[in-house]
Image: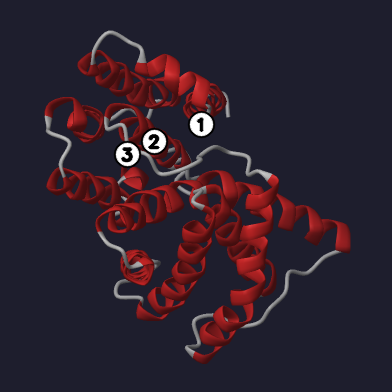
Amino acid sequence: MTAALPALLLEVTFYLASMFQSIRDFFARLSSWRAQAGLLWISALLPYLVFSLSAGTFLRNAFFVLALLTAVFSFWYAVLPRRFAYDAGFLIVAAAPILLHVFQRIYLAPDPHVRLDILGHLMWIRLGVLALLVLRGWKPGPFSLWPQRREWSSGFTWFLLFVLPIIALDLALHDSRFEPLRGGWWQVTAIAIGTFFGILWVVALGEELFFRGVIERAVLNRSASPALAIVLSSLLFGAAHLWFHQFPNWRRACVAFLLGIACGIAYWRSGSVRAPMVTHALVVTTWRVLFK
């Protein structure tokens, strides 16, 4: 904890800062794209160094891998043109470390039963946010931590419309089983609230930005067919879940595809990343509380 807490506080500070439009605007006014990318790269390495040097888990090879990955991610749009092919390459780079569980092998704790790769996941999300929204200048629609009233309403509406079909598909495929959390009502409520906001501000935020705010938005910009944009982004969203726990997890991929449809419609109807974030977080919270 002595090593992890300062690193976590530093990473959370960087993460939260990247979510505010005023700070992104300030960051965008820096002298050059390469200066912005350089600051992103340095900020990506600092929490790892703070933790690993203090905990005694610093590994030269792990640091070199992290430095290479974050350099590619940070400098991608500072070096390469802003074109569709390079946007697709950026999304592949964004997905690869998550799907291959790279951060679990870099952020090592003294106790092998403790996982601190959350430091890597938070870092990777905020690097992607700033690279896309500042260096690339991508316009995904309204994006921040806290949805507005109409976005809460939209996200909740599409959750209600899709939660039963998602549960039915999940049970039909034997992807999980009904097993509610045990404990007092206040314990279950506290866990549900904590789970919801944890998913909303980390998992849903990152995934909805990339799958809806980038992929679905790109298809919507190039095609007059919202159905094509929603289905394509949902197919890719489902495919990304093939790596969930074990590959190929086609059951989870099918369930995720249906969740992607719900989130895709929420994004299309609202024009905001925050609406599908709500839908996504509500579905995952329901699953965590009622199923196993």
Q: Which mark is residue 106?
A: 3
The quarter of the rendered structure image containing the C terminus is bottom right
Q: Position of residue 256 (x, y in %)?
A: 44, 71
Crowding around mark 3 (Cα neighbors within 10 Å: few <14, some 14 to 19, many 20+) is many
Q: Which amino acid is tagged 2?
A: Val
Which residue is identified by label 2?
129
Residue 16 lies left or right of residue 112; in this view the side is right
Crowding around mark 1 (Cα neighbors within 10 Å: few <14, some 14 to 19, many 20+) is some
Q: Earlier in the sequence, mark 3 or mark 1?
A: 1
Q: Are marks 2 and 1 in contact (CB under 8 Å)?
A: yes
Give 56 or 152, whichever is nearer the viewer: 152
Tell me the residue at 67%/62% (across/down): 156
Tell me the residue at 20%/45% (across/down): 87
Tell me the residue at 46%/75% (across/down): 258
Q: Position of residue 46 (x, y in %)?
A: 38, 20
| Quadrant of the rendered image containing residue 237 | bottom left
Q: Earlier in the sequence, mark 2 or mark 3?
A: 3
